[in-house]
Image (cartoon, coloured by chain):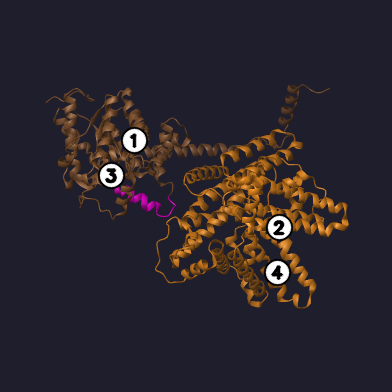
Amino acid sequence: MALHPSARLRAHLAWLRRGQGALQLRRPFGATLVWAAVVLAGLAAGVEIFARSEQGSELIPLRGVGSRHFQFEVKVDRLEKLAETAGPVDCLFLGDSTVHQAVDPALITARLKQDPGVAMTCFNFGVRGLNQAVLAPLAEILVDEYRPAWLLVGVNVTGLQRRLAVPDNDAILGSPWVRQRLGDPNWEGWLLDHSRAYRAFDPFRNWMQDDYLEELLWEIGRWRNMDPFGHLSPTTVLAEPLPDMTVPLNQAIAGLMISFEPSPENLAGLERTLELTRSGVQVVLVEIPVHAGFLTLLENGRADYDRGRQTVADLAQRHDAVFLMDDSFDQLIPLDGWSNLNHMNRNGSQIFSAWLSGRLAGLLRAGRLHAAEEPVSP
Amino acid sequence: MTLLTVKNAFIVGAVLIGSFLAPGRWHKGLLLGGSLLLLVRLTGPYAVVFIGAVVVTWLLPRAWSRWPRALTPLFLLGIAANLAVLAVFKYRPSAMHGLARRLFGDGAAESLGPVLVPLGLSYFALQAVSYLVDVRRGRAPAGSGLADVALYLTYFPKFLAGPIERAGDFLERLAAPRSVDNERLARSLTLLVVGLFRKFVLANPLLAISGIETYASADAPGGAASAALLAAHVFAVYNDFAGYTNLAQGISGLFGLDLSPNFRRPFFAQGLGDFWSRWHASLTGWLKEYIYFPLTRAMLKAGRGWAGPAALALPPVLTLLFSGLWHGASPQFLAWGGLVGALLAVEAVFGRSEWGRRWRAAGGAAAAARAVLVTTVMSLTTVLFVLPIPAAAAFWRSLFDGSAPAAIHPALLPLLAISLLLDAFQARGRDDASLVRWPLPLRAAGLALAVLVIFLATRSTGPRVFIYQGF
């Protein structure tokens, strides 16, 4: 008579227990694995404690987040350090390299402290190649982490162009840390989020690749002079007010700018960023101007530029958000304020930041913006 | 396609758990099921070619044992059929692409991409030949079941890149009862860790440092820098393949089935012939067993002019020419085979002389010098494995162009030292898994450190595939 399945299973388990299966382990076993696990845990804990210590922190040149985009990594690292040393970060400037070079948070906070007397800690999170489509999820991550009072989003109107595709963005969005923060759990993202030692190792992961170390050290050196608030602008000055069309880069830009049309992805990104007001953060859009010479690369020149700007203004209006723009940038920022046709240099950034602080002060006074803290007593 | 994927690991894990839980009579079925599943995953539509070859290879010995008069023609048919499949895939891939298009449609043919030699076919063909020869010689049973033959030819730990097993030995091991006790488990896990260490900590960084293949179209840096690149490449290939073999042995060990060794510290070799018995030893063993020895015996038997120095010189040249063809269908591999064969022939003739005997007998520093010389000569021949003949010649010239010493990667020498140190430990224990005999604290610390370093090394964006799966 055939045995009941449960009886057969019991018989089989008994057979296995008698050591008659293929696996025939005798006690004791596993001591090496247990001790190795203990050593590994001890080793990991020791390295982690050292990485979190003051001496360890000083030795770590960069705490990576696995994106392979050095400037992004440096900005994340510097922002963290600012929050660790200066306390809560009250305002974040977000955008691409034009924001990185144009906005000087130290100057803006100093001006705001003078008038209308609010103390703020601000950070420039402008990163090369960040378009609005990528900026939106990053803004969500940063707002979630730092809870700033203000989110000032730099809008580089030409950067909205449909044809512009920036490979840097894939590196950022594909990084395990960003994926983890955006709700795509992965073990490496978790590790980057929780282990200072692993983050110290991360930038060196490809040490064996040709020139990787040199490149890493060059990148670290390149951003070394960035101030604690994330700003670094060059001192080089634009030589010619009109683009030299024999230069391949200008030809390429002109090719990309034909039939200017803001991309739906970037506009959707901008809209997603504006919706962060629901999280309690005040979102302000800021026009980051280009030199007038840049407009000659657009098929319809200023008309294209103004059309793009109007699109952003309409979007801001729909969300009841402020869009800080100006028609007098051509007069405001002189030729020696530009390092190239769409990036300001140190001189330009001082002028632009002074203009921006004035507009922010105006918004504060008008009650359109609220400071993170009460006004400082005179 | 690489073996080291989560899906493949899951399949292997599932088969392993099944083999631990199921009664012994199910083991072969489980192993064969897992092997066929991985075969399909690794070779895609070409799996039908393998399955067809398995059936033909299994049928022929049964046929000739039934009709002994047809033995020789059927035997030759089997050898020719297996080698023909390999040759057509290797040397006329465009024809196979056309056939794939006809059989499976444009989409499937395109999905096969540029890799037209199905993974594992080179190893499969040699083992099929081994089965036919061993059955004919009476070293393997003619009446083996289809499952046994299929498992011998497609067993997943060795399918992609060996070790190339002799049919008689493997089928004997397959027939014996298998179990995994403490010692075997520890040994297998040690081999897995050593394999991963060699692949990720040594081979991948050395491959990244070397980049020797880029000099097919560019000038090599010259002088010591070229020598450093070459050293990086040779040690990378060694660690990649030895690492793969250790992984195959470790995985197979978990199923209670031992696989043959493939590498026995080749950089400690005392002669060129010795080097070849230590490097890809399972291929060398196959070549010796099925080409070199029969050829030498035939020449000695023929007597007269064939029995003298010719019997020493010709077999290695012809054997290595076959080896070159097996590695690839281009003049560079043929040149490599001819060159190494000629070097082996010179060594064989020289070894018989008084000078040769003295050179071999000298110990101490002379032994170290022999190892360095052998490694250097073999490394130089390796250039032909990577570069076409003109580029290889230019690379060799660059080694002696007297260029000023250029900067070499700072990690190169430490990586070479670690590789040699690991070899030395294994040589001392006369076993790739000799680390398992270390005292417990040292073993635990070594394992912890190895796991940590392997983990960190896997974080690089370096290659995941094994070099020899391409042959």
User: Taking the image as drawn, is residue B87 in sight?
Assistant: yes
Q: Are marks 2 and 4 on the same chain?
A: yes
Q: Are marks 3 and 1 on the same chain?
A: yes
- For discs 3 and 4, the disc positioned in front in the rendered view: 3
Residue B3, placed above or below residue B314: above
Three-letter amino acid code of the residue under disc 4: Pro
Three-letter amino acid code of the residue under disc 2: Ala
Q: Residue visible at 29% across and 55% down?
A: A247
The magenta region covers A207-222
- For the residues marked 4 and 1, what is the alpha-carbon distance in whole angstroms? 70 Å
Give me the chain letter of mark 4: B
Q: Residues within 10 Å of mark 3 (few under 14, many from 20)?
A: many
Q: Residue visible at 70% across and 33% down?
A: B21
Q: Is residue A211 magenta?
A: yes
Are discs 2 and 4 less than 8 Å apart at CB?
no
Chain B colour in the picture: orange
* Chain in brown (letter): A
* Residue hosting label 3: A298
Estimate the x, y position of residue B350 in percent, counting from the top left. 65, 75
Three-letter amino acid code of the residue under disc 3: Leu
Label placed on residue A295:
none
* Residue hosting label 4: B315
**Residue B234 found in image quarter:** bottom right
Q: Are marks 4 and 1 on the same chain?
A: no
Give me the chain letter of mark 3: A
* Residue hosting label 2: B84
- Residue A106 is left or right of residue B117, and the answer is left
- For discs 2 and 4, the disc positioned in front in the rendered view: 2
- For the residues marked 3 and 4, what is the alpha-carbon distance in whole angstroms? 74 Å
Estimate the x, y position of residue B117 in percent, counting from the top left. 62, 53
- For discs 3 and 1, the disc positioned in front in the rendered view: 3
* Residue hosting label 1: A132
